[in-house]
Image (spheres, grey):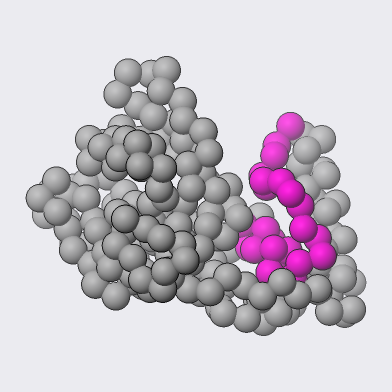
């Protein structure tokens, strides 16, 4: 069971070739038996599961393939489930609290589980004066995507929160999985936003 108030918990893991940020939107297509069972249990017990990046290995089980997991992941809260297709679930999830794996193991079913330390949420800090352009350009980017029928972020929008702005840019920018992982792991949201700001300036997105 997971208790968001506790500092440690046991988690069912969903390894992905992707990085989930707190408050981020994640879509999943579930068809493997181990993950169908996992999602069923999460729905019954109204609990999240852990999304963790794959350093090595594939998302779909491949016999005795070697699998290596990242050390830091993010809880995923199930928002919507579409089970119209037999044997397939389509999920929309919201990123929650980050966690650090302490011990991990694989069940006979192939499902990964772990004991984990829950990490503190980002402090809510306003973007510094010199990085207000990050927030303004993010608002414009989201608006442009909305005009194209794309809705990449969950509401409420928090353009006055440095960590939220940095996380949304990390999702939208063409970054490698490794770069996204390292940015997600940073404990200081102002450092994360500063790195995003430098990237945007290097690409001419903001002046």
Q: Residue at x 32, y 18 (%)?
A: 86
**How many labels sit on residues?**
0
Magenta-drawn stretch contains 196:
no
- Displayed quadrant of residue 9: bottom left
Residue 125 against residue 155 in the figure, above or below: below
Closer to the camera in the image, 93 or 28: 93
Q: Is residue 77 left or right of residue 68?
A: right
Closer to the camera in the image, 108 or 62: 108
Residue 75 against residue 152 in the figure, above or below: below
Q: Residue at x 17, y 58 (%)?
A: 106
The x, y position of residue 2, in whole percent, is: 37, 58
- Displayed quadrant of residue 15: bottom left
Q: Is residue 117 left or right of residue 165?
A: left
Q: Is residue 100 at all visible to an observer of this figure?
A: no
Q: Is residue 100 left or right of residue 108?
A: right
Magenta-drawn stretch contains 165:
yes
Closer to the camera in the image, 155 or 144: 155
The x, y position of residue 1, in whole percent, is: 31, 55
Q: Is residue 42 left or right of residue 148?
A: left
Q: Residue at x 46, y 25 (%)?
A: 82
Residues rendered magenta in the picture: 149-171
The x, y position of residue 173, in whole percent, is: 66, 59
- The C terminus: image quadrant: bottom right
Q: Residue at x 55, y 48 (%)?
A: 94
Q: Is residue 79 at all visible to an observer of this figure?
A: yes
Residue 178 against residue 13 in the figure, above or below: below
Residue 114 against residue 129 in the figure, above or below: above
The x, y position of residue 135, in whole percent, is: 82, 63
């Amino acid at each position: 069971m997971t208790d968001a108030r506790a500092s440690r918990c046991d988690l069912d893991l969903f390894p992905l070739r992707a990085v989930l940020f707190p408050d981020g939107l994640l879509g999943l297509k579930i068809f493997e038996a181990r993950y169908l069972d996992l999602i069923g249990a999460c729905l019954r017990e109204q609990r999240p599961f852990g999304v963790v990046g794959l350093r090595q290995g594939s998302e779909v089980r491949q016999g005795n393939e070697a699998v290596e997991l990242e050390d830091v992941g993010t809880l995923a809260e199930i928002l919507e489930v579409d089970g119209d297709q037999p044997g397939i679930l389509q999920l929309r999830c919201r990123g929650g609290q980050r966690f650090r794996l302490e011990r991990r193991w694989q069940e006979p079913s192939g499902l990964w589980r772990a004991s984990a330390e829950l990490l503190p949420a980002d402090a809510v800090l306003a973007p510094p004066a010199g990085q207000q352009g990050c927030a303004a350009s993010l608002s414009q980017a989201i608006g442009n995507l909305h005009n194209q029928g794309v809705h990449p972020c969950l509401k409420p929008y928090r353009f006055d929160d440095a960590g939220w702005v940095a996380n949304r840019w990390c999702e939208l920018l063409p970054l490698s999985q490794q770069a996204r992982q390292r940015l997600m792991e940073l404990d200081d949201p102002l450092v994360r936003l500063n790195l995003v700001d430098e990237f945007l300036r290097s690409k001419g997105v903001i002046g």
